Image (cartoon, rainbow, N blue to C red):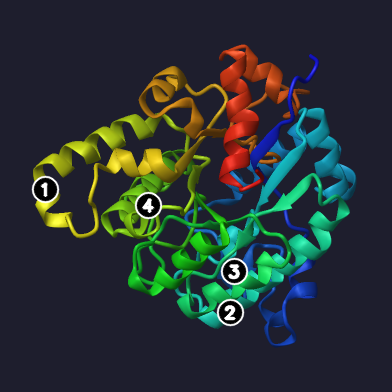
Amino acid sequence: MVKEYPIIDADSHIFEPFDMWEKHLEPAYQSFAPSLDMKIQGEAIYYKTSNEVVAQWNKQIMQAHPLARLNGFTNELHVLETKKMGVDISFIYPTLGMSITAIDTMEPTLAGAFTRAYNNWLYQDFCSYDPEILKGVGMINLHAPEEMVSELYRIAKFNCKAVCLRPNPVKGRLLSDPAYEPFWTECEKLGIAVSIHEGTHSRLPTVGADRFNTRFALRACSHPMEQMMALLALIEGGVLERHPKLRVGFLESGCGWLIYWLWRLDEEYKCHYWEVKDNVKMKPSEYFQRQCFIGYELGEPGIEQVIEYVGADKLIFGSDYPHVHWGQEEGETECFHIQKVLHERLPKEIVKMILWDNPARFYGLQ
Protein backbone atom coordinates (compact mmCIF):
# COMPACT_ATOMS: atom_id res chain seq x y z
CA MET A 1 0.00 0.00 0.00
CA VAL A 2 1.35 3.44 -0.96
CA LYS A 3 1.60 5.85 1.97
CA GLU A 4 -0.40 9.02 1.49
CA TYR A 5 0.83 10.80 4.61
CA PRO A 6 3.43 10.36 7.37
CA ILE A 7 2.60 8.21 10.39
CA ILE A 8 3.30 8.64 14.11
CA ASP A 9 3.38 5.62 16.40
CA ALA A 10 2.23 7.36 19.59
CA ASP A 11 3.04 4.50 21.97
CA SER A 12 5.89 2.09 21.38
CA HIS A 13 8.26 0.65 23.98
CA ILE A 14 11.81 -0.47 24.54
CA PHE A 15 13.15 -3.47 26.42
CA GLU A 16 16.02 -1.79 28.23
CA PRO A 17 19.33 -3.70 27.93
CA PHE A 18 19.96 -5.23 31.32
CA ASP A 19 23.47 -3.86 31.80
CA MET A 20 22.24 -0.34 31.14
CA TRP A 21 21.21 0.26 34.74
CA GLU A 22 24.59 -0.44 36.26
CA LYS A 23 26.29 1.62 33.56
CA HIS A 24 24.05 4.66 33.96
CA LEU A 25 23.20 4.67 37.66
CA GLU A 26 25.27 7.14 39.62
CA PRO A 27 28.10 5.44 41.60
CA ALA A 28 26.29 5.70 44.94
CA TYR A 29 23.35 3.70 43.54
CA GLN A 30 25.02 1.12 41.30
CA SER A 31 24.54 -1.63 43.89
CA PHE A 32 20.77 -1.22 43.37
CA ALA A 33 20.92 -2.25 39.69
CA PRO A 34 18.26 -4.95 39.11
CA SER A 35 19.37 -8.57 38.99
CA LEU A 36 18.51 -10.99 36.20
CA ASP A 37 15.72 -12.47 38.34
CA MET A 38 14.03 -9.04 38.43
CA LYS A 39 14.93 -8.07 41.97
CA ILE A 40 16.52 -5.03 43.55
CA GLN A 41 18.79 -6.13 46.38
CA GLY A 42 16.63 -9.20 46.85
CA GLU A 43 13.26 -7.42 46.63
CA ALA A 44 11.03 -8.44 43.72
CA ILE A 45 10.19 -5.67 41.27
CA TYR A 46 6.94 -7.25 40.07
CA TYR A 47 3.91 -8.11 42.21
CA LYS A 48 1.85 -11.29 41.90
CA THR A 49 3.69 -12.74 38.95
CA SER A 50 4.98 -16.26 38.42
CA ASN A 51 7.74 -18.04 36.56
CA GLU A 52 5.13 -19.42 34.17
CA VAL A 53 3.78 -15.94 33.36
CA VAL A 54 7.30 -14.66 32.69
CA ALA A 55 8.19 -17.68 30.56
CA GLN A 56 5.02 -17.44 28.47
CA TRP A 57 5.46 -13.72 27.82
CA ASN A 58 9.12 -14.17 26.88
CA LYS A 59 8.12 -16.95 24.50
CA GLN A 60 5.50 -14.75 22.83
CA ILE A 61 7.95 -11.86 22.52
CA MET A 62 10.66 -13.93 20.89
CA GLN A 63 8.16 -15.62 18.58
CA ALA A 64 6.78 -12.27 17.47
CA HIS A 65 10.19 -10.65 17.03
CA PRO A 66 12.69 -13.28 15.86
CA LEU A 67 15.26 -10.66 14.78
CA ALA A 68 15.72 -9.73 18.45
CA ARG A 69 17.08 -13.18 19.27
CA LEU A 70 20.54 -12.22 18.06
CA ASN A 71 21.27 -8.78 19.51
CA GLY A 72 18.16 -7.90 21.51
CA PHE A 73 15.83 -4.97 21.01
CA THR A 74 18.40 -2.46 19.81
CA ASN A 75 17.75 1.01 18.48
CA GLU A 76 18.74 -0.26 15.04
CA LEU A 77 16.08 -3.00 15.21
CA HIS A 78 13.50 -0.51 16.50
CA VAL A 79 14.06 1.71 13.45
CA LEU A 80 13.91 -1.30 11.11
CA GLU A 81 10.63 -2.58 12.55
CA THR A 82 9.20 0.92 12.66
CA LYS A 83 9.80 1.33 8.94
CA LYS A 84 8.22 -2.05 8.23
CA MET A 85 5.06 -0.82 9.95
CA GLY A 86 5.08 2.27 7.75
CA VAL A 87 5.89 4.55 10.70
CA ASP A 88 7.91 7.76 10.36
CA ILE A 89 8.13 8.79 14.02
CA SER A 90 8.07 6.45 17.01
CA PHE A 91 7.46 7.72 20.55
CA ILE A 92 9.18 5.38 22.99
CA TYR A 93 8.04 4.45 26.49
CA PRO A 94 9.90 2.42 29.12
CA THR A 95 9.24 -1.19 30.08
CA LEU A 96 11.30 -2.20 33.11
CA GLY A 97 11.91 1.45 33.94
CA MET A 98 8.21 2.03 34.49
CA SER A 99 8.05 -0.97 36.85
CA ILE A 100 11.22 -0.23 38.81
CA THR A 101 9.86 3.09 40.03
CA ALA A 102 6.41 1.55 40.69
CA ILE A 103 7.50 0.23 44.09
CA ASP A 104 5.64 2.29 46.67
CA THR A 105 8.17 1.66 49.44
CA MET A 106 11.15 2.77 47.36
CA GLU A 107 13.18 5.61 48.82
CA PRO A 108 12.54 8.81 46.85
CA THR A 109 16.26 9.40 46.28
CA LEU A 110 16.69 5.91 44.81
CA ALA A 111 13.66 6.38 42.54
CA GLY A 112 15.27 9.62 41.38
CA ALA A 113 18.51 7.84 40.57
CA PHE A 114 16.66 5.26 38.46
CA THR A 115 14.75 8.05 36.71
CA ARG A 116 17.90 9.96 35.80
CA ALA A 117 19.70 6.80 34.67
CA TYR A 118 16.85 5.84 32.36
CA ASN A 119 16.47 9.33 30.88
CA ASN A 120 20.20 9.67 30.27
CA TRP A 121 20.34 6.32 28.49
CA LEU A 122 17.13 6.98 26.52
CA TYR A 123 18.12 10.34 25.09
CA GLN A 124 21.90 10.16 24.92
CA ASP A 125 22.23 6.53 23.84
CA PHE A 126 19.11 4.88 22.43
CA CYS A 127 17.42 7.77 20.59
CA SER A 128 20.67 9.33 19.39
CA TYR A 129 20.94 6.54 16.78
CA ASP A 130 18.21 8.23 14.70
CA PRO A 131 16.64 11.20 16.51
CA GLU A 132 14.37 12.01 13.58
CA ILE A 133 12.53 8.71 14.07
CA LEU A 134 13.19 7.79 17.72
CA LYS A 135 11.49 10.18 20.14
CA GLY A 136 11.93 9.35 23.81
CA VAL A 137 9.16 9.91 26.35
CA GLY A 138 10.83 10.79 29.63
CA MET A 139 10.32 9.34 33.08
CA ILE A 140 9.47 11.52 36.08
CA ASN A 141 9.98 10.64 39.76
CA LEU A 142 6.58 10.83 41.49
CA HIS A 143 8.19 9.62 44.73
CA ALA A 144 9.94 12.98 45.12
CA PRO A 145 7.73 15.95 44.09
CA GLU A 146 10.62 18.31 44.79
CA GLU A 147 12.65 16.68 41.98
CA MET A 148 9.97 16.65 39.30
CA VAL A 149 10.40 20.16 37.90
CA SER A 150 14.20 20.04 37.80
CA GLU A 151 14.14 16.71 35.93
CA LEU A 152 11.51 18.09 33.56
CA TYR A 153 13.76 21.02 32.68
CA ARG A 154 16.77 18.74 32.39
CA ILE A 155 15.18 16.41 29.83
CA ALA A 156 13.58 19.35 28.01
CA LYS A 157 17.16 20.13 26.93
CA PHE A 158 17.14 16.75 25.17
CA ASN A 159 14.14 17.96 23.14
CA CYS A 160 11.74 15.87 25.22
CA LYS A 161 8.17 16.27 23.93
CA ALA A 162 6.34 14.25 26.59
CA VAL A 163 6.71 12.51 29.93
CA CYS A 164 4.92 9.41 31.20
CA LEU A 165 3.29 9.00 34.61
CA ARG A 166 1.65 6.02 36.26
CA PRO A 167 -2.04 6.60 37.12
CA ASN A 168 -1.67 4.90 40.52
CA PRO A 169 -1.27 6.70 43.84
CA VAL A 170 2.38 7.03 44.87
CA LYS A 171 3.08 7.26 48.58
CA GLY A 172 -0.58 8.09 49.13
CA ARG A 173 -0.62 10.96 46.63
CA LEU A 174 -3.09 11.11 43.74
CA LEU A 175 -2.10 12.92 40.56
CA SER A 176 -4.09 15.88 41.86
CA ASP A 177 -2.05 16.16 45.06
CA PRO A 178 -0.97 19.77 45.77
CA ALA A 179 2.64 18.61 45.92
CA TYR A 180 2.54 18.06 42.14
CA GLU A 181 1.12 21.48 41.29
CA PRO A 182 4.49 23.05 40.30
CA PHE A 183 5.03 20.14 37.91
CA TRP A 184 1.70 20.66 36.15
CA THR A 185 2.44 24.37 35.90
CA GLU A 186 5.78 23.78 34.20
CA CYS A 187 4.44 21.11 31.82
CA GLU A 188 1.84 23.60 30.66
CA LYS A 189 4.43 26.37 30.41
CA LEU A 190 6.93 24.26 28.44
CA GLY A 191 4.27 22.65 26.26
CA ILE A 192 5.37 19.16 27.29
CA ALA A 193 2.58 16.59 27.02
CA VAL A 194 1.79 14.16 29.84
CA SER A 195 1.00 10.54 29.03
CA ILE A 196 -0.79 8.47 31.65
CA HIS A 197 0.38 4.91 31.13
CA GLU A 198 -0.35 1.92 33.34
CA GLY A 199 1.45 -1.41 33.68
CA THR A 200 0.49 -4.67 35.37
CA HIS A 201 2.13 -6.28 38.43
CA SER A 202 3.26 -2.99 39.94
CA ARG A 203 3.90 -2.54 43.65
CA LEU A 204 1.72 0.54 43.77
CA PRO A 205 -1.95 0.50 44.86
CA THR A 206 -3.74 -0.94 41.82
CA VAL A 207 -7.37 -1.77 41.10
CA GLY A 208 -7.97 -5.51 41.37
CA ALA A 209 -4.66 -6.39 43.00
CA ASP A 210 -6.35 -6.72 46.38
CA ARG A 211 -8.67 -9.48 45.18
CA PHE A 212 -7.21 -11.21 42.08
CA ASN A 213 -3.99 -13.14 41.51
CA THR A 214 -3.80 -14.07 37.80
CA ARG A 215 -2.29 -11.89 35.10
CA PHE A 216 -5.54 -12.45 33.21
CA ALA A 217 -7.48 -10.66 35.95
CA LEU A 218 -4.83 -8.17 37.04
CA ARG A 219 -4.26 -6.80 33.55
CA ALA A 220 -7.96 -6.71 32.74
CA CYS A 221 -8.46 -4.42 35.74
CA SER A 222 -5.30 -2.37 35.93
CA HIS A 223 -5.13 -0.64 32.57
CA PRO A 224 -8.66 0.74 31.99
CA MET A 225 -9.73 1.13 35.63
CA GLU A 226 -6.61 2.96 36.81
CA GLN A 227 -6.92 5.25 33.81
CA MET A 228 -10.52 6.00 34.72
CA MET A 229 -9.49 7.06 38.20
CA ALA A 230 -6.53 9.06 36.91
CA LEU A 231 -8.86 11.06 34.66
CA LEU A 232 -11.21 11.54 37.60
CA ALA A 233 -8.36 12.74 39.83
CA LEU A 234 -7.22 15.29 37.26
CA ILE A 235 -10.78 16.61 36.90
CA GLU A 236 -12.01 16.39 40.50
CA GLY A 237 -8.74 17.76 41.85
CA GLY A 238 -8.88 20.78 39.54
CA VAL A 239 -5.68 20.07 37.58
CA LEU A 240 -7.41 20.44 34.21
CA GLU A 241 -9.34 23.50 35.42
CA ARG A 242 -6.17 25.29 36.56
CA HIS A 243 -4.12 24.27 33.52
CA PRO A 244 -6.32 24.61 30.42
CA LYS A 245 -3.39 24.31 27.99
CA LEU A 246 -1.99 21.15 29.57
CA ARG A 247 -2.20 18.20 27.15
CA VAL A 248 -2.93 14.80 28.73
CA GLY A 249 -3.10 11.43 26.97
CA PHE A 250 -4.44 8.12 28.28
CA LEU A 251 -2.59 5.28 26.58
CA GLU A 252 -2.62 1.49 26.29
CA SER A 253 -5.99 1.04 27.93
CA GLY A 254 -8.23 1.14 24.88
CA CYS A 255 -10.82 3.84 24.34
CA GLY A 256 -14.14 2.06 24.85
CA TRP A 257 -14.30 2.84 28.56
CA LEU A 258 -14.27 6.56 27.84
CA ILE A 259 -17.88 6.80 26.64
CA TYR A 260 -19.34 5.31 29.78
CA TRP A 261 -16.95 7.11 32.12
CA LEU A 262 -17.56 10.59 30.73
CA TRP A 263 -21.30 9.95 30.73
CA ARG A 264 -21.13 8.78 34.35
CA LEU A 265 -19.00 11.72 35.47
CA ASP A 266 -21.32 14.18 33.73
CA GLU A 267 -24.31 12.56 35.43
CA GLU A 268 -22.65 12.78 38.84
CA TYR A 269 -21.72 16.38 38.16
CA LYS A 270 -25.36 17.27 37.52
CA CYS A 271 -26.23 16.07 41.02
CA HIS A 272 -23.12 17.00 42.96
CA TYR A 273 -21.60 20.02 41.19
CA TRP A 274 -22.05 22.04 44.39
CA GLU A 275 -19.55 19.77 46.13
CA VAL A 276 -16.71 20.23 43.59
CA LYS A 277 -17.61 23.62 42.08
CA ASP A 278 -14.34 25.26 43.15
CA ASN A 279 -12.28 22.77 41.10
CA VAL A 280 -14.76 21.62 38.47
CA LYS A 281 -16.43 24.54 36.70
CA MET A 282 -17.78 22.76 33.65
CA LYS A 283 -18.90 19.26 32.73
CA PRO A 284 -16.16 16.61 33.02
CA SER A 285 -16.65 15.67 29.37
CA GLU A 286 -15.86 19.27 28.40
CA TYR A 287 -12.46 19.08 30.09
CA PHE A 288 -11.66 15.97 28.11
CA GLN A 289 -12.82 17.60 24.90
CA ARG A 290 -10.66 20.63 25.58
CA GLN A 291 -7.29 19.07 26.33
CA CYS A 292 -7.19 15.26 26.45
CA PHE A 293 -6.37 12.44 24.04
CA ILE A 294 -6.89 8.69 24.20
CA GLY A 295 -5.19 5.71 22.60
CA TYR A 296 -6.97 3.31 20.27
CA GLU A 297 -6.00 -0.35 20.09
CA LEU A 298 -6.29 -2.48 16.96
CA GLY A 299 -9.28 -4.79 16.99
CA GLU A 300 -11.08 -2.78 19.65
CA PRO A 301 -14.85 -2.70 19.06
CA GLY A 302 -16.94 0.44 19.20
CA ILE A 303 -14.42 2.92 17.83
CA GLU A 304 -17.14 4.43 15.66
CA GLN A 305 -19.19 5.19 18.78
CA VAL A 306 -16.16 6.71 20.53
CA ILE A 307 -15.55 8.96 17.53
CA GLU A 308 -19.20 10.01 17.55
CA TYR A 309 -19.08 10.76 21.28
CA VAL A 310 -15.75 12.60 21.70
CA GLY A 311 -14.69 13.31 18.12
CA ALA A 312 -12.09 11.79 15.83
CA ASP A 313 -9.62 14.50 16.82
CA LYS A 314 -9.11 12.92 20.27
CA LEU A 315 -7.85 9.51 19.13
CA ILE A 316 -4.21 8.52 18.70
CA PHE A 317 -2.72 5.14 17.85
CA GLY A 318 0.12 3.20 19.47
CA SER A 319 1.48 -0.11 18.24
CA ASP A 320 2.80 -1.10 21.70
CA TYR A 321 5.83 -2.52 19.86
CA PRO A 322 7.55 -4.76 20.90
CA HIS A 323 5.12 -5.88 23.62
CA VAL A 324 2.77 -8.81 22.95
CA HIS A 325 -0.41 -9.43 24.93
CA TRP A 326 -2.25 -12.05 22.92
CA GLY A 327 -1.77 -15.56 21.59
CA GLN A 328 -0.19 -16.14 18.19
CA GLU A 329 0.02 -18.93 15.69
CA GLU A 330 3.41 -20.55 15.16
CA GLY A 331 5.47 -18.42 12.79
CA GLU A 332 3.18 -15.40 13.07
CA THR A 333 5.08 -12.17 13.68
CA GLU A 334 3.99 -8.98 15.33
CA CYS A 335 4.92 -6.59 12.54
CA PHE A 336 2.01 -5.16 10.56
CA HIS A 337 1.42 -2.18 8.31
CA ILE A 338 -0.45 0.27 10.49
CA GLN A 339 -2.05 2.38 7.76
CA LYS A 340 -3.31 -0.65 5.86
CA VAL A 341 -4.88 -2.21 8.97
CA LEU A 342 -6.71 0.97 9.96
CA HIS A 343 -7.95 1.64 6.42
CA GLU A 344 -9.82 -1.65 6.63
CA ARG A 345 -11.91 -0.16 9.43
CA LEU A 346 -12.15 3.61 9.07
CA PRO A 347 -12.46 6.31 6.40
CA LYS A 348 -9.19 7.66 5.03
CA GLU A 349 -9.61 11.15 6.46
CA ILE A 350 -10.14 9.78 9.99
CA VAL A 351 -7.20 7.40 9.67
CA LYS A 352 -4.98 10.35 8.77
CA MET A 353 -6.17 12.21 11.86
CA ILE A 354 -5.46 9.23 14.13
CA LEU A 355 -2.06 8.44 12.61
CA TRP A 356 -0.68 11.94 12.14
CA ASP A 357 -2.77 15.03 12.89
CA ASN A 358 -3.83 14.09 16.44
CA PRO A 359 -0.52 12.72 17.75
CA ALA A 360 1.29 15.65 16.17
CA ARG A 361 -0.91 18.00 18.19
CA PHE A 362 -0.60 15.92 21.34
CA TYR A 363 3.19 15.75 21.19
CA GLY A 364 3.54 19.35 20.08
CA LEU A 365 5.17 18.63 16.72
CA GLN A 366 3.25 21.34 14.88
Where residue 155 appears, as percent x and y from the top left, is 67, 67
Q: Residue furthest bottom?
A: 28
Evaluate whether residue 56 shows in this view.
no
Q: Which mark is residue 110?
A: 2
Give SS at disc 3.
helix
Query: The C terminus is located in which quarter?
Result: top right
In this view, the residue in front, 321 or 274, is: 274
Q: Nearer the viewer, mark 2 or mark 3?
A: 3
The reply, left or right, for residue 217 in relation to residue 350 is left
- Residue type beneath disc 2: Leu
Q: Which mark is residue 256?
A: none
Where residue 108 appears, as percent x and y from the top left, is 51, 79
- Dot 2 and dot 3 residues touching (CB under 8 Å): no
Where residue 19 appears, as percent x and y from the top left, is 80, 66
Residue of label 1: 272
- Dot 1 and dot 3 residues touching (CB under 8 Å): no
Query: The N terminus is located in which quarter?
Result: top right
Q: Nearer the viewer, mark 1 or mark 2?
A: 1
Q: Which circle's residue, 1 or 3, is located before the other in the chain? A: 3
- Residue type beneath disc 3: Leu
**Measured along the vertical axis of the image, is residue 330 above or below residue 253?**
above
- Residue type beneath disc 4: Ala
Residue of label 3: 152
Give me the C-alpha separation between circle 1 and circle 2: 41 Å
In this view, the residue in front, 106 or 360, is: 360
Give SS at disc 2.
helix
Give SS at disc 1.
helix
Give SS at disc 4.
helix
Q: Nearer the viewer, mark 4 or mark 1?
A: 1
Where residue 15 appears, as percent x and y from the top left, is 72, 52
Residue of label 4: 230
Q: Nearer the viewer, mark 4 or mark 2?
A: 4
